[in-house]
Amino acid sequence: MEKNLRLDNVSKNFKIFQQKDYYSMSTDSFLLPYFSNVPLSEKKNIIELCSGNGGISVILRERSRACIEMLEIQENLVELTKKSLEYNNLTNIHVQNGDIKEVKSLYNPSSFDYVICNPPYFPVEIMPKKREKFNHNISRHELLCNLTDVVTAIKYLLKQNGKFSLVHRTYRIADIISECSKVGLSIKRIRFVYSKKSSEGSKMVLVEGSISAVNDIKVEQPLYIYNEDGTYTNEMKKVYGID
């Protein structure tokens, strides 16, 4: 194995390569596939936008036989994903190097049953003055794509009866609902994530929606990561695949 790479478990059956000095899989990357009602049939197809090192899509292969496509703008992460797919002998799952702002040149419209995305969270305006486009900044801040770009790409790619899901920071929920509404998408499920029951507020939110003009949002039970003693909750153990 290359010196700056490590091989990490992401599920009971699969591992992925991660680059030590790059942004790695975090809690949100495990929560999103757990929350998402992805199609199970091999006749369906899923696309992950901003796929990073491919961990989310690899986890989805545990749950679904659908054809999975990934789109990632950072070429070195695409190569890392390919390495992980080969290591796990995964089939019917592919990754492509590309920009979500250019999806119209990459895919046909209305061609996916499910779109899933863990996008950059933070607006460029709140970044430090030094704004180099290295991996951590690209992964966390809206340097190469923003929420509008993500939502626009979802609407273009999604089939009429398809669904999409996102994980994001809770303080941006109004932005998410507003941007979705602008393009004809509607949020149908929301689940707020808390560190623990005694936390003052939620920091992460999981949303799922579809092409619709009706905002009939179902707010699900909160998801707590930790018990008060600092151990993982039973549900979080399921998220991580801990027996």
Image (tube, rainbow, N blue to C red):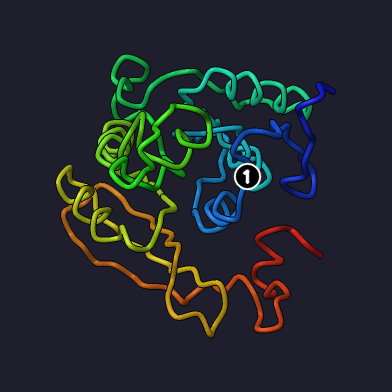
Position of 138 relative to 195 (above/below): above
Residue with the mark numbered 1:
25
Position of 130 relative to 36 (above/below): above
Rendering coords of residue 70 (x, y %): 51, 28
Look at the image and tell me in which quarter the N terminus lies: top right
177 on left or right of 117: left
**Residue type indicated by callout 1:** Met
Instruction: Name the residue furthest front.
Output: 129
Rendering coords of residue 21 (x, y %): 66, 33
Mark 1 Cα shell of 10 Å, populated few (<14), some (14-19), many (≥20):
some
Marker count (numbered): 1
In the picture, residue 31 is in which quadrant? Answer: bottom right
Mark yes or no: residue 29 visible.
yes
185 on left or right of 88: left
The residue sitting at 31% across, 20% down in the picture is 102
The residue sitting at 55% across, 31% down in the picture is 67
Mark yes or no: residue 114 visible.
no
Instruction: Name the residue furthest right.
Output: 1
103 on left or right of 57: left
The residue sitting at 16% across, 54% down in the picture is 213
Position of 90 relative to 175 (above/below): above
Look at the image and tell me in which quarter the C terminus lies: bottom right
Residue in front for this viewpoint, 33 or 194: 194
In the picture, residue 203 is in which quadrant? Answer: bottom left
Rendering coords of residue 145 (x, y %): 33, 32
224 on left or right of 129: right
Rendering coords of residue 88 (x, y %): 77, 30
The residue sitting at 44% across, 80% down in the picture is 200
Label 1: state its secondary structure. loop
